[in-house]
Image: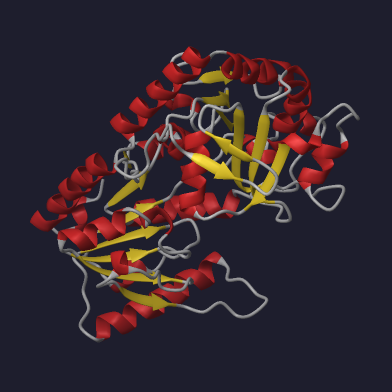
Amino acid sequence: MQLLLIHQNFPGQFRDLAPAWLKKGHQLTAISAADSPAGDAWRGLFHCRYLIPEKSSLTVLERGKTVGKICRKLKKKGFNPDLVLAHSGWGEALQLRGVWEQIPIVVMPELWGCPSALGFGFDDALNGKSLDGDPFLLPNLVSELSIVQANAAVVASRSQFNSFPKILRKQLTLLAEGLDLKTIRPNRQASIELPQINLKAGDPIVTFVSRQLEPLRGLRQVLRAWSRVSKAHCQAHLLLIGDEFDYGYGVETPQGPSHLQDAMDSWDEGVDRNRIHFLGHVNHSTLMQILQCSACHLAMSYPYTLSWSVLEAMACAAPVITNVGSPVEPELIHDHSGLIIPFNDVEALSDAILQLLSNLNKRKNIGLAGRKVVEERFNLEKTLQQYEKLFQRFQRSQVPSERT
């Protein structure tokens, strides 16, 4: 099939899907605000990039207009895809139906936002504080409009599906983006070389991964718990992966230079800072080595989107600790495929960490059960089969009345 993929930061959610589709012989065109991905896996991709003015950003309406303009140019040149798949969160899908009336469109709306997704009514640190207006009003309207205009809408996890109003859930298909479990897998011989120490699988390593180190992903709780863990377990190491100086998805601004520094300032003098390692951003292969070494992966979060790194940790058989209401909680069974604790209970978090670090059999069993969850629900091979069925459905008929 001739597929048109639209994502402002392409490949984004198409990271593993698109190369697999190219390999299967599908013809792919992508539209995004990012550079074209490089490497042999992307051979055959036709990429159209739109520019964002320097030191500026595009509103959802401007993005929709910009992408619509590119699509009209492509159509004028004779390009008419068999199917369009578009992440709709930034407004890029808003004008697609006006360009191609008869071509099936599948959107990926990702999340229906609400105050708890930003911690209000969820994080005790925000008690007494409230949102200034509704930051999700426009994104939710964009999601709803995109869903209404599309033939189908896809969300990748149960938590994302459940975030939408019931009236819209009827139009959603739960379909994971998938992980390549042949390459993302456990490795008991994995090791990590850090500036001052070398660590290996089997060592008491605690990992925390977030694009930005921020309260939305539980940074405060993690570092408060670590104060107790580091004193109770004198050999444990904490590895933090992510950007320190970006505020992230949340609305809080740090009091000091970063959220990380704010959290560390609350420590007493008894915390051994030599056993906490700030690694910043790492490449994907290094991240996989780290997760393969992890004896305990912390997946604390507000009810926001499900991070790939959490699923990758589970795929590497790293036992996961998460909280009630987190994006990964609906996928897990407490004390079987993960440990689930209350978000605001720092003592429960530190107890859970120490429990895994001190019990080899428990962390092995939970890690393997977590891997099994990913094999069953987030396996790229299964996801590709489900997408092929979706493609075949729209190959049979390209009439807009088929919209779900």
Task: For the N terminus, give its image quadrant.
Answer: bottom left
- Residue 350's place in the image compared with 171, above or below, is above
Which residue of the protein is positioned furthest toward the bottom in this rendering?
77
Q: Position of residue 385 (x, y in %)?
A: 18, 44
Q: Residue at x 17, y 53 (%)?
A: 391
**Does residue 243 appear to the left or right of 138 in the view shown?**
right
Q: Residue at x 52, y 49 (%)?
A: 140
Q: Position of residue 42 (x, y in %)?
A: 31, 67
Q: Position of residue 400 (x, y in %)?
A: 21, 58
Tally the marks: 0
Q: Quadrant of residue 169?
A: top left
Seen from the viewer's position, the closer of residues 265 and 183 is 183
Q: Residue at x 51, y 79 (%)?
A: 51
**Does residue 235 appear to the left or right of 334 in the view shown?**
right
- Residue 89's place in the image compared with 354, above or below, is below
Q: Position of residue 212 (x, y in %)?
A: 65, 49
**Does residue 132 appear to the left or right of 301 in the view shown?**
right
Task: For the C terminus, give its image quadrant.
Answer: top left
- Residue 75's place in the image compared with 274, above or below, is below
Seen from the viewer's position, the closer of residues 337 and 8 is 337
Seen from the viewer's position, the closer of residues 280 and 53 is 280
Q: Is residue 262 visible?
A: yes
Q: Residue at x 69, y 20 (%)?
A: 350
